[in-house]
Amino acid sequence: METMHVVELEACSVTFYDDGIVHTHFKDHHLVSPEEVQEMFETIEKERKGRKALLMVSVGEGTTMSNEARAHASSEASCKYIAADAIVVRDFGHQLAANVFVRHHKPHRPIQMFPDHETAMTWLATHRDLIDPV
């Protein structure tokens, strides 16, 4: 799997792969805002020329999303940009927060949590039928 390129935003780095998978990593010690989530979505939309992406999300040490950011990330409007989410869970506290996102906000698309990047990427690859080919 080839990396196309990386876009650095203030809150996160967004890595685009040539197979429709996008990896967003939110930087260390940050409270992610809804505006930063929207900036990430708009970056994906621009780079993918309006085509949805399969999104792998990871977060740095001490990083979390505000409730408003979680609500925005899982909103029906977010499905315009994202076809499926794989959340890489760093530790137990992060797993609890990710569980809240999955169970409380209930995104309108496939979503799973994974212990590492490899299993997350493998799962996302099984959902390529949800996105337009390049």
Image (cartoon, helix red, strand yellow):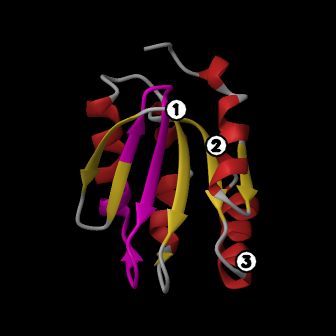
Instruction: Please tell me which residue is depicted at 73% across the width and 28% down the height of the picture.
Output: 126
Residue type marked 2: Met
Q: Which numbered disc, 3 or 1, marks the residue closer to the eye?
A: 1
| Residue holding disc 3 | 96
Residue farthest toward the front in the current orientation of the protein: 2
Is residue 68 magenta-colored? Answer: no
Q: In this view, does 86 lie above or below 9?
A: above
Between the C-alphas of marks 1 and 2, the distance is: 10 Å
Badges 2 and 3: C-beta atoms under 8 Å apart?
A: no
Residue lying farthest to the top in this orientation: 133
Residue annotated with mark 1: 1
Q: Which amino acid does label 3 sit on?
A: Leu
Kindly identify the residue that appears in the image at 28 percent across and 42 percent down.
Answer: 43
- Seen in the picture, residue 30 relative to 1 is either above or below; the reply is below
Mark 3 neighbour density, 10 Å: few (under 14) some (14–19) many (20 or more) = few
**Residue position marked by numbered label 2 in the rendering:** 121
Marks 3 and 1 sit apart, C-alpha to C-alpha, by 31 Å
Can the viewer see residue 109? no
User: Residue 28 magenta-drawn?
Assistant: yes
Q: Earlier in the sequence, mark 2 or mark 3?
A: 3
- Find out whether the residues at labels 1 and 2 contact each other: C-beta distance under 8 Å: yes
The magenta-colored residue range is 15-37
| Residue type indicated by callout 1 | Met
Q: Of tags 2 and 3, which is closer to the observer?
A: 2
Horizontal relation, residue 134 to residue 76: left or right: left
Tell me which residue sits at (41%, 22%) in the image.
51
Looking at the rendered structure, the secondary structure element under dot 1 is loop
Locate residue 131: give its quadrant.
Answer: top right
